Amino acid sequence: MERVVSGIRPTGNLHLGNYFGALQNFIKMQNTHSCYFFIADYHSLTTHPNPADLHQNVKQVLVEYLAAGLDPEKSAIYLQSDLPETAEMYLLLNMNAYMGELERSASFKDKVRTQPENVNAGLLTYPVLMAADILIHNAHKVPVGKDQEQHLEMTREYARRFNKMYHTDFFTEPTAFNFGEKLVKVPGLDGTGKMSKSDTGMNAIFLCDDDKQIEKKIKAAKTDLGPQGENTPFSPEIENIFALFELVSSKETINYFKLKWNNGEEKWYGEMKKQLITDMVSFVNPIRQRIQELSKDSEYLSKVARLGAEKAHESGAETVRKMREIIGFKKFY
């Protein structure tokens, strides 16, 4: 069975964009692949989080992964820091990573530009740690977004470089996971681009949002001045609203409002938003309730984290042991 590795930084709550994008595919994937899903708490140290915030963010991501449908019996769901072999592989790979290629990384150059006061070595070697996360399980596939494609190619290069240097075919060269279908793009509530975290939190519906928060956000979502005659194309703002309907509403509901648009009717946006609020609340509520239940169940979360760490260790420790052997480390005792 092919191995798949994917991680998420513990930087806040998951939103509908995460759910309908990566998470829905992860849920399908865990039935067909050997999956390792990790919470990247080592990676988050590049921004020097407060210790209390770090722990709470890790817990929140773990809870929301589980509430959304990841199954700890089917997959390894673990904390990056619970697999110390990752740090050792990171060190070993760093010995064969070169300054020039690391400095040319697009993400590093972007960080140098946007946060010149915090250009640390962790940022420079971020792609190496990412490579360690992947290669430690000798993964075949990695689900990556456009912004991570360069890092995946660097991982492939480190695998090739190790194999060539030590005359082995030990490491698999991982490839990007192809879900075989068009990925769902969840629009933001501000009328532009995709749903994402923002300073105000008003651009996204989070899985933990309560009814009032959902209502407030959808009421504030951008619309336009109304249809400009019969059968006119959707404006970008209304296209976004209908894209949200497609995620949570029935076909009858969607067709009802499309007919109003196509007929050039006026003054129905209030009714439309009210219906979207109702349908969105119905969709999010069961997930939010599960999040609340899991957040209080420390015993279960400990069990999940322990099980994930054991699965990850079983795979990762063996990889590092063989890697050390190939390099030439031998004990005198």
Image: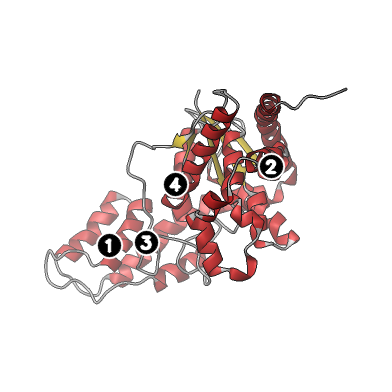
Task: State the residue in front, 138 or 16.
Answer: 138
Of labels 2 and 3, the one closer to you? 2
Amino acid carrying mark 1 in the image: Glu
For the point 82% across and 24% down, which residue is it?
Answer: 331
Which numbered marker is on residue 149? 4
Return the disc, 1 or 2, that comes first in the chain's sequence: 2
From where the camera sits, is residue 276 visible? yes
Write the residue at 78% across / 24% down.
330
> Quick one: label 4 or label 2, which is nearer the N terminus?
2
| Label 2 vs 3, first from the N-terminus | 2
Q: Do the residues labelled 1 and 2 touch (CB within 8 Å)?
A: no
Q: Is residue 261 left or right of residue 37?
A: left
CA separation in Å, label 3 and label 4: 35 Å
Instruction: State the CA–CA distance, disc 3 to disc 1.
Output: 14 Å
Q: Are marks 2 and 3 in contact (CB under 8 Å)?
A: no
Query: x%, y% of residue 80?
Result: 66, 43
Q: Distance between the residues labelled 1 and 2?
A: 48 Å
Q: What residue type is labelled 3?
A: Leu
Q: What residue type is labelled 2?
A: Leu
Q: Of circles 3 and 4, which is in front?
A: 4
Q: Can residue 210 be seen in this view?
A: no
Mark 1 and mark 4: Cα distance apart in space? 29 Å
Residue 32: which disc? Answer: none
Q: How far apart are marks 4 and 2 (CA)?
A: 22 Å
Q: Which residue is the site of mark 3? A: 276
- Amino acid carrying label 4: it is Glu
Q: Mark 1 points at which residue?
A: 239
* Helix, strand or loop for disc 4: helix
In terms of sequence position, does the residue under pointer 1 or pointer 4 come before the other?
4
**On the image, numbered disc 2 is attached to which residue?**
91
